[in-house]
Amino acid sequence: MREIQLRDAKSGLSALVDDAVGGEPAIITRHGKREAVILSYQEWQRLSQVPSFGRLLMAAPLAPDDLPPRDTTPLRQTEF
């Protein structure tokens, strides 16, 4: 992924969009600091539809017998 300064991105925005649609996203920097990424709408949609880890766990086809039994031993006593 290439990096481009903000002032150069402003002057060549159309080319940046064409490159992003063609599969080449770009990082836009301001004062040497990474500030934004330009990528195709299709790629953004793909990335934004990734489910959270919690949703993945909830969707897992697990039966109650698939999980190990819970440890019921009492907690150990500690002294400070």
Image: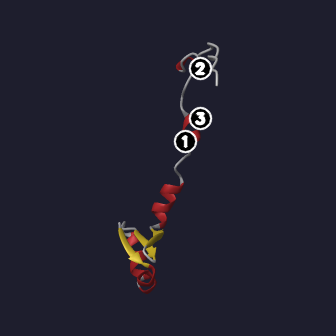
Mark carried by residue 53: 1
| Mark 2 vs 3, N-terminal side | 3
In which quadrant of the rendered view does residue 9 lie?
Answer: bottom left
What residue is shown at x 48% (from left), y 56% (from top)?
A: 46
Q: How many C-alpha atoms fall within 10 Å of the one at disc 1: few (<14), some, or many (≥20)?
A: few
Please say which color scheme the image uses.
secondary structure
* Residue 79, x across and y down, in percent: 64, 21
Left or right of 2, for residue 30: right
Q: Which of these two is toward me, 32 or 53?
A: 32
| Mark 3 vs 1, N-terminal side | 1
Left or right of 51, for residue 23: left
Rendered view: 76 above or below 34: above
Q: Which of these two is toward me, 22 or 6?
A: 6
The alpha-carbon separation of the residues under discs 2 and 1 comes to 20 Å
Q: How many C-alpha atoms fall within 10 Å of the one at disc 3: few (<14), some, or many (≥20)?
A: few
Residue bearing mark 3: 58
What residue is shown at x 36% (from left), y 68% (from top)?
A: 24
Q: How many C-alpha atoms fall within 10 Å of the one at disc 2: few (<14), some, or many (≥20)?
A: few
The alpha-carbon separation of the residues under discs 2 and 3 comes to 13 Å
Residue bearing mark 2: 64
